Image (spheres, helix red, strand yellow):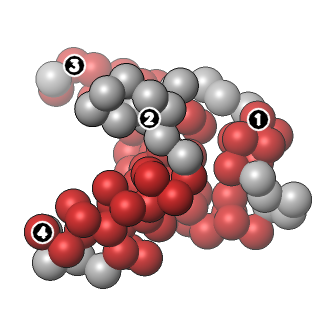
Amino acid sequence: MLFVSRTGAALTGWGVFRVFAKRSREAWVSVERAVHGWRSWAAIQMLDNGAQESEVMALCGWSSHSMLVKYQRGRAAERALNTHARFSPVAKTVR
């Protein structure tokens, strides 16, 4: 079980949505934005930590690469800088 209630019972998809909706309202964020943001963050974390694109697509329920490309596009510059820092001899000596 990924999400559980206070009593330890598994939360349904609707239950998870209600938790997100409540927390979103408290933070003055639209529910759609909060759920999308969490899903985006989860997909990016999986990719950054070694998951294959096909695995992320399967876990997120995507049948095409279009959503994966959207999520990755937003992090392209950050990933490029991190890659540069890992391979650049100058970046290693400056740190």
Q: Amino acid at mark 1?
A: Glu
Q: Nearer the viewer, mark 1 or mark 2?
A: 2
Residue at (50%, 32%) from the top-left corner? 10
Q: Amino acid at mark 4?
A: Glu
Q: Is residue 66 above or below residue 15?
A: below
Q: Could you say where residue 55 lies in the image, as x and y percent from the top left? A: 76, 35
Secondary structure at numbered mark 3: helix
Cα distance, mark 3 to mark 4?
A: 45 Å
Rendered image: mark on residue 3: 2
Cα distance, mark 1 to mark 2?
A: 21 Å
Q: Is residue 31 visible?
A: yes
Q: Nearer the viewer, mark 1 or mark 4?
A: 4
Q: Could you say where residue 44 lies in the image, as x and y percent from the top left? A: 51, 46
Q: Amino acid at mark 2?
A: Phe
Q: Amino acid at mark 3?
A: Thr
Q: Could you say where residue 76 lies in the image, as x and y percent from the top left? A: 50, 57
Secondary structure at numbered mark 1: helix
Image quadrant where one finds the C terminus:
top left
Residue at (19%, 74%) from the top-left corner? 25
Q: Residues within 10 Å of mark 4 (few under 14, many from 20)?
A: few
Relative to 27, 22 lies left or right: right
Q: Nearer the viewer, mark 2 or mark 3?
A: 2
Report the residue marked by disc 4: 26
Q: Is residue 90 visible?
A: no
61, 49: nearer the viewer: 61
Q: Residues within 10 Å of mark 2 (few under 14, many from 20)?
A: few
Q: Could you say where residue 79 lies in the image, as x and y percent from the top left? A: 46, 46
Secondary structure at numbered mark 2: loop
Cα distance, mark 4 to mark 2?
A: 20 Å
Relative to 77, 47 lies left or right: right
Q: Is residue 79 above or below residue 76?
A: above
Q: Nearer the viewer, mark 3 or mark 1?
A: 1
